[in-house]
Amino acid sequence: MAEGGASKRMWGGRFEGSPGRALQEYTSSLPVDSRLYKQDIAGSIAHVHMLGAQKIIPAADAQALSKGLNTVRKEIDTGAFRFLPSDEDIHSAVERRLHELLGPEVAGKLHTARSRNDQVALDLRLYAREAIGDIGRAICRLQSVLLNLAQSHQATLLPAYTHLQRAQPTTLAHHLLAYVAMLQRDFDRVQDAYDRADIMPLGAGAVTATSLPIKREMVAAELGFGAISQNSMDAVSDRDFVVEIEAALALVMVHLSRLAEEIVLWATSEFDFVELPDEYATGSSLMPQKKNPDVAELVRGRTGGVFGALQAMLTTLKGLPLSYNRDLQEDKEGFFRAVDTALQSLDIMARMLSRVRFEVASMERAASDPALLATELAEYLVRKDVPFREAHEVVGRAVKRAASKKLAISSLTGEQWRSLHPAFGDDVEKLFDAHQAVTRREVPGSPGPRAIKRALLRGVLAVKRNQEWLKENTTA
Ligand code: ARG
């Protein structure tokens, strides 16, 4: 049979002519879905085991098929496998090779009670479960790096910013722990998405299942699925699990991009809060003095690609009548891109951060600006029973008075303070200590030393719980 001949295709029987080259190229998904070969073959093996056990095909054929499928997997593993231009997708490529190895008598039985519609849904769900495991582990690694840094910087002061204006002193630990919290929500989201990905769709057939006595639970058990799909029409057309994972990854990238932006800012001479490790910075071909934060910039820059995958998947789904439509083939490219980008970005951020040097002296210098302690002065008055609004007004006047003389607010004398409000005592000077200001903040969620100790412990325990869940539900 000539290559590309109609009867060589899985659906060739109804056709007389061969598909044109242009159609072949336009419709093929092989360049994208060939990376699903392991999942595809694992799914097929579970399927033939069940066909054999249910006596839908003879046991000897089932055995030959699973042996043949293992051979095909090894061929692809080692690069010995030859993909042909007529292979439409990974499913047809594997089956075509099986025909070459086993002959049509046996190989022709693989696709019994199955369609590529439920087959591709199965492959993608197997991939999704693995992706959740990989992403979860990468999140934990970055959380651990951040927790270690926070551990060592519990007393390192820097300004906390609002509107990118210096607001109040905080600690670097507190700042980094904010990212640990974001990443924990990211972990919770992918973990939550797992249950809805963990549903076995095979047996849905093309759209209304099959009249043959298949046993879907058996396939689900062999592949370790938590449940089987409940409606065959939904099973072949549902890609909600892709949307959910992509949405979770979009937020992962939002968080990484914000962290990346801080690194870009902090590495400027204007901030001078971090020194990037040489292995994670690049130079300029023109300006010899430059050390550029390219890794952080690329994390920020690749974020849009992940948002795009989510948008594209939603758009693909929104107009589809039930059930499978070829449009769904477009689910994979964006999904793989989103997973790859998020994984690589989590990984490189963890590596870079573990090697970054914080310029503690610069941070503390910025944090020791007395203007950052204006709130302390107001709260001092509140402790002396002055209403907060009045206290705020009084301190505002003090700030103005100091500024008009181009002085720091800390240089006002005891007398001047008392003239602003009689409640000010001699101890007001003691307020101009950023360390003390941070130490006084001990309500839950704040940067005080005891609150931070608790937050560190909570973070470590959360990562431990994450890791336990990953161990129980996913394979590394
Ligand atoms: N390559 C296809 C996809 O990714 C496989 C399913 C094809 N089904 C079909 N009826 N043509 O969606």
Image: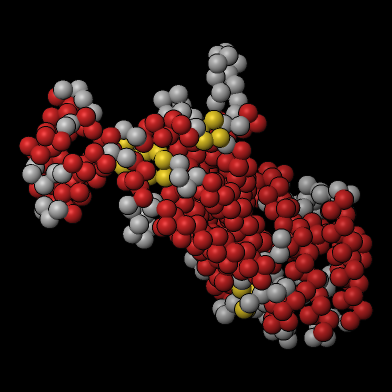
**Seen in the image, is 243 located left or right of residue 277?**
left
Up/down of 286 relative to 388, above or below: above
Q: Tell me what residue is drawn at x 81 percent, y 48 percent.
A: 84
Q: Position of residue 412 (x, y in %)?
A: 17, 31
Residue 94 x/y as whole percent: 81, 59
Query: Does 1 sit left or right of 465 as displayed?
Result: right
Instruction: Give left or right: position of 32 versus 50.
Output: left
Q: Quadrant of the N terminus?
A: bottom right
Question: Which residue is nearer to you in this view: 367 or 72?
Answer: 367
Which of the 4 quarters of the picture holds residue 282?
top right
Given residues 429 and 121, the one toward you in this image is 429
- Residue 350 in percent (x, y) is at 60, 45
**Residue in the image at 56% along x and 23% along y:** 291
Describe residue 301's horizontal placement relative to residue 65 as left or right: left
Number of callouts: 0
Q: How is the image coloured?
A: secondary structure
Q: 147 and 219: which one is in front?
A: 147
Residue 355 percent location from the top left of the image: 61, 38
Q: Is residue 180 visible?
A: yes
Quarter of the figure with the C terminus: bottom right
Q: Does residue 122 appear in this view?
A: no
**In the orientation shown, which residue stands out farthest toward the front?**
426
Q: Residue at x 11, y 47 (%)?
A: 423
